[in-house]
Image (spheres, rainbow, N blue to C red):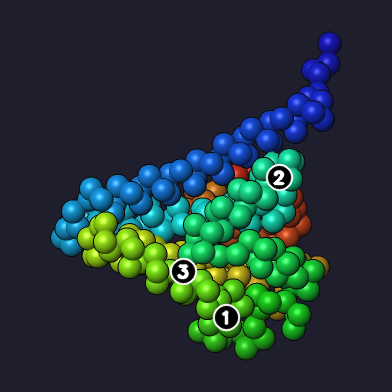
Amino acid sequence: MPAMQPSSSAKDLYLTSRGTLIAGGIIVGWLLLLLFLLGSYTINWSSPLTYLFVWLQTHLYTGLFITAHDAMHGAISPKPVVNKRLGQLSALLFAFNSYNKLFPKHHEHHRFVASDKDPDYHASQNFFIWYFSFLKQYITWWQIVAMAITYNLLKLAFPQENVVLFWIVPSLLATLQLFYFGTYLPHRGEHSNRHKSGSQRKNHLWAFLSCYFFGYHWEHHNHPGTPWWQLWKKKR
């Protein structure tokens, strides 16, 4: 007998449970590691472990934004409320970003990719000009105020050095990581394809470590509803 295909409802249940679990895992993992690094870890500048923790926290910060990004495409859960709430939470935890502001701008990027109407693009192609233009699109004064207030509150409970190294520095590195692998590399130069995007070479381990498969950028533009953890399957 031919193998039975899963029903549409079964597929929805799979995406709901798996996507929600992965999104929740990133959020909880980021929070638990942050609390450990702020309250229990003694910084040792001569220990490789300190730098490994900075990288790991950066990676989880990037995961927060990728989670918010997937929510913008409805790729966490087919349930709109679950999808939006997880997107809002993960965006907020990433330096108080506003999901409601990110959402329309990201869809403008997809609609007007690599044009003067694309908020993520800069025609100069200069890395530094493009990067600061990218930051200006998304950083608001209320974010800076919220970060400053939170920083001063965290200093009351945890060592200042830990707050800087494990809360502030990873957020800045993750922003650079997201820009470099998710915007600059795939959209610089000229591309003849309809998505005006390049893509990393096929190497799933590096694609995950560098930016949660977001370097497979042509594939993302071609399959925007595919969650990050399944994007590798779309690699040509």
Q: Which mark is residue 81?
A: 2
Distance (Cα) linking label 1 and label 2: 29 Å
Residue under the image location 60 percent in, 70 percent down: 183
Marks 2, 3: nearer the viewer: 3
In space, the residues marked 1 and 3 are separated at their CA atoms by 17 Å
Quadrant assignment, res 123? bottom right
Choose the circle earlier in sequence order: 2 or 3. 2
Q: Answer yes or no: is residue 61 visible.
A: yes
Q: Secondary structure at mark 2?
A: helix
Task: Measuring from the top left, give residue 38's x and y in whole percent.
Answer: 28, 54
The Cα atoms of the two marked residues, 2 and 3, are separated by: 26 Å
- Which of 42/216 is in front? 42
The amino acid type of the residue labelled 2 equals Val
Q: Amino acid at mark 1?
A: Lys
Q: Residue at x 64, y 83 (%)?
A: 122
Direction top: furthest residue: 1
- Is 19 left or right of 29, judged from the image as shown? right
Label 1: element kind:
helix
Q: Which mark is residue 146?
A: 3
Which tag, 1 or 3, sits closer to the chain's start?
A: 1
Q: Amino acid at mark 3?
A: Ala
State the image quarter where residue 171 is shown: bottom left
Q: Position of residue 131 (x, y in %)?
A: 54, 79
Seen in the picture, residue 221 relative to 172 is either above or below; the reply is above
Residue 188 visible? The answer is no
Q: Position of residue 97 (x, y in %)?
A: 56, 65
Checking the image for residue 136, the label placed there is 1
